[in-house]
Image (cartoon, rainbow, N blue to C red):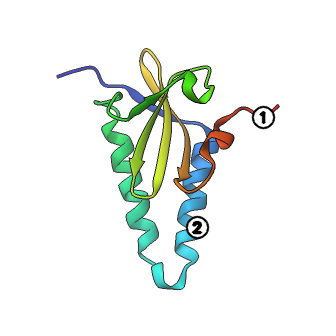
Amino acid sequence: MGKKYNIRYLQLARSDLLGIAEYVNSQAWERDAANRLVDSLEKAILRLESFPYSGALYGNSFGFKEEHGMLVVGNYLVFYVVYDDFLEIRRIIHGKRRFVDLLQPSS
């Protein structure tokens, strides 16, 4: 079996996940959808422990200083960076948002 990477979430990514769940849960017609969506996101992210390069990789093409992986989970994009022994979840963003702007560091 291959190397397993520890997964760490930036606080911003945790906030993204919470905001997504709160928004979906607030929709009267989608009460159980929030739990299903969060479960789907978490299962997909956990697969990165064993397969960190399974997402599309982006480097300088978007002006990132570090190579970012992007995992598509339904309508959401999970952005992460792989280091030597851990994987850092940077953002979880709806695919219709301008994710490049959201991933750039604040000036």
Tell me: 97 left or right of 77: right
- Name of the residue lying farthest toward the left: 1
Spot occupied by residue 33 in the image (x, y as percentages of width and height): 42, 72
- Identify the amino acid type marked 2: Glu
Q: Nearer the viewer, residue 35 or 58?
A: 58
Q: Secondary structure at mark 1?
A: loop
Q: How many marks?
A: 2
Circle 2 crowding by C-alpha within 10 Å: few under 14, some 14–19, many from 20: few
Residue at point 59% right, 52% down? Answer: 16
- Identify the amino acid type marked 1: Ser
- Name of the residue lying farthest toward the right: 107
Q: Secondary structure at mark 2?
A: helix
Q: Which mark is residue 16?
A: none
Q: Residue under circle 2?
A: 22
Q: Which mark sits nearer the N-terminus, 1 or 2?
A: 2
Residue at point 47% right, 19% down? Answer: 83
Q: Residue under circle 1?
A: 106
Circle 1 crowding by C-alpha within 10 Å: few under 14, some 14–19, many from 20: few
Residue at point 49% right, 33% down? Answer: 80
Classify residue 20 by image quadrant. Answer: bottom right
Question: Is the residue 71 above or below the residue 6 in the image?
Answer: below
Q: Nearer the viewer, mark 1 or mark 2?
A: 1
- Name of the residue lying farthest toward the top: 84
Spot occupied by residue 98 in the image (x, y as percentages of width and height): 63, 49
Q: CA distance from mark 1 to mark 2?
A: 25 Å
Question: Do residues under tags 1 and 2 come within 8 Å of each other at their CB atoms?
Answer: no
